[in-house]
Image: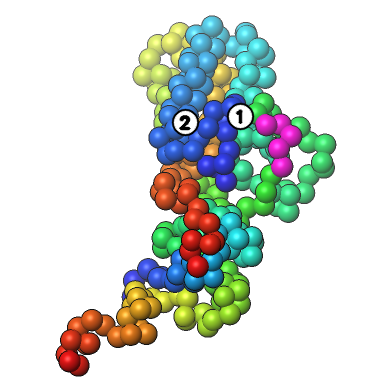
Amino acid sequence: MIEQATFLGMPIRTHRQRQLLVIVYYLFVLCMGLFYFWIGWRYIWFAVPQMLTLGGLFGGIKIGGPVKFYNDRDLSLSSGIQSLNLSRPFSFIPALDEREKARRDAAHFLAYRILIVSLFLMSAAVLVPHSMSSSSHYTWVAGRVQVVFLFLVIYAVSLPQSVLLWTEPQDPVADLIEMPPSQTS
Amino acid sequence: MGNDIYNRIAVLRAERGLSRQDLADALGINYQTVGFLERGDYSPSLELAMDASDFFNVPIEAIFSRKPFRPLSEQVYGSPSAKKNKR
């Protein structure tokens, strides 16, 4: 379904476009995270809605987003649920077929493994200053743990979608040109 | 034993004059998945394989195989080398 989707009006038909989207997305999230990390935790409540919107941007919950991990059969939530995604907010989500479900599951598995390594590195980044640096440095880092935590939430929410966008192979051009039935019989 | 599963879905689809979308609708899958199946990039579940067998009305082993299929023309008319030997 990815090739048929658009992201905020931009087509993501080719593999290159999808990879570029992932890079731009994480650069934006990183810049935003660094900005809030720099200005400190006092402004964290300004960051929460922005970060939550960013986290849901790739997938949405039920509607919107280029990567669909759920369909109506799998997600038995009330119909009034609101997507965080801003693109195509009223689009209909077709059910995933078995290949797409297999891709979804593989993406979650890979994302989980990436997340474990990331959590380990993030923990080290917070704990190492505690043991090696001066207490003032640790206090500076500890005062910004909320920002790191918010960044981690976005990272965790968007990672499976990013893995799928990054790894989903592109259909050959020939696949996009269908021969009419009269020419194939 | 290798994990590759070969199939004749592209041949059968073309033979019946169906588009990928037609076949996808009949099997209840996305048309892109038909492309993945035809290229051998995705091995179907037993359920989907049996659905394909029912749809094309041929035995499942006529569609899927662990070994590469010989071209249909070769199966019907024999291989060119065998023809030369006959002469």
**Residue at (47% x, 49% y) in the render:** A177
The correct choice, above or below, for A163 with respect to B24 in the image is: above
- Same chain check for tags 2 and 1: yes
Left or right: B74, with A180 as reference point: left
* Percent x, y of residue B22: 60, 60
Q: Would residue B76 be found to the left or right of residue A119 on screen? A: left
A181 or A19, nearer to the observer:
A181
Q: Dot 2, crowdedness within 10 Å: few (<14), some or many (≥20)?
A: many
Q: Where is residue A44 in the image (x, y as percent from the top left)?
A: 62, 13
Q: Does A173 sit above or below residue B36?
A: above
Q: Mark 2 points at which residue?
A: A22
The answer to whether residue A55 is visible is: no
Secondary element at tag 2:
helix
Label at residue A57: 1
Under mark 1, the amino acid is Leu
Q: What element carries label 1?
A: loop
Q: Which of A74 and A19 is in front in this view?
A: A19
- Above or below: residue B26 compared with residue A70: below
- Image location of residue B10, percent across then percent down: 46, 66
In this picture, which residue range is highlighted in magenta? A88-92
Q: Does the magenta stretch include residue A67?
A: no
> Mark 2 or mark 1: which comes first in sequence?
2
Q: Is residue B26 above or below residue A8?
A: below
Q: Residue at x 71, y 42 (%)?
A: A92
**How far is the residue under mark 2 from the one under mark 1?**
11 Å
Location of residue A52 in the rendering, given as x and y in whole percent from the top left corner: 64, 25
